Amino acid sequence: KNQVEQSPQSLIILEGKNCTLQCNYTVSPFSNLRWYKQDTGRGPVSLTIMTFSENTKSNGRYTATLDADTKQSSLHITASQLSDSASYICVVSRDYKYIFGTGTRLKVLA
Amino acid sequence: DVKVTQSSRYLVKRTGEKVFLECVQDMDHENMFWYRQDPGLGLRLIYFSYDVKMKEKGDIPEGYSVSREKKERFSLILESASTNQTSMYLCASRQASYNEQFFGPGTRLTVL
């Protein structure tokens, strides 16, 4: 069983709407939790990083939250744009190891 | 800006061929990684190199080997390609003391 589970697997929203992606993990302890954006056919690019003691981090229209007690993180996208169409991957790191979720594929429609 | 480049974006090879995938980073990073990415499975670590000529097996090293002769270059070798090695291959690098990974654009390998 994957130690990092993401939901939903895929999501379609209209341009301008908000959405929230979920990440549940069982990795413990961990160094930090990241959210990556991966455009189709490209490598992942880091959006946010949080240590276990942080509970929110923003990067423009992207806001990540972390609840270390329930082992859940979420990525909230505000006022979505067509360019937000991508896969979003939650990654928990411990030492040099990175445990990747399987991602949420987001499609933003005009 | 950190730049990680991979030798090919797309590659088509035949079963049994020896395949070389190259990765180069320009930020003097200590650590380099090779992953494969398959639908529904997420990224899985094949090999990790923490310094020149040093390597560690990841979660799925079978059928692969690596070479790190220079700090900036990390090569992934498929000794005898098989169809189940058809996948997207991603290289990443990071500074040893700061564990953000920077990824290359990926190589989509098809083995026929």
Image (cartoon, coloured by chain):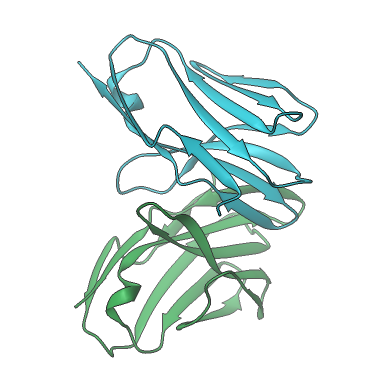
Chain colours: A cyan, B green
Quadrant of the image containing the N terminus of chain A: bottom right
Quarter of the image holding residue B8?
Answer: bottom left
Residue A100 screen position, x and y as percent:
55, 49
**Dividing the picture into quarters, in which one does residue B32 lie?**
bottom right
Quick one: which residue is furthest to the front in this view?
Answer: A1
Asked if residue B99 is positioned above or below residue A22 in the image, the reply reads below
Horizontal and vertical percent position of residue B108:
30, 62
Work out whether residue A25 or residue A44 is closer to the camera in this orientation and state it.
A25
The answer to whether residue B110 is left or right of residue B31 is left
Q: Is residue A41 left or right of residue B47?
A: left
What residue is shown at x 34% (from left), y 88% (from top)? B18
In front: B88, or B84? Answer: B84
Q: Residue at the location (63% across, 41% down)?
A: A25
Q: Residue at x 35, y 53 (%)?
A: B39
Q: Quadrant of the C terminus of chain A?
A: top left
Looking at the rendered structure, the number of numbered marks drawn on it comes to: 0
Q: As displayed, is residue A84 above or below residue B59? A: above
Q: Residue at x 33, y 65 (%)?
A: B87
For residue B24, side relative to residue B71 (left or right): left
Q: Which image quarter: residue A44?
A: top left
Whole-percent x, y for residue A58 in the image: 60, 19
Q: Position of residue B76 (x, y in %)?
A: 46, 76
- Rendered view: A100 above or below A110: below
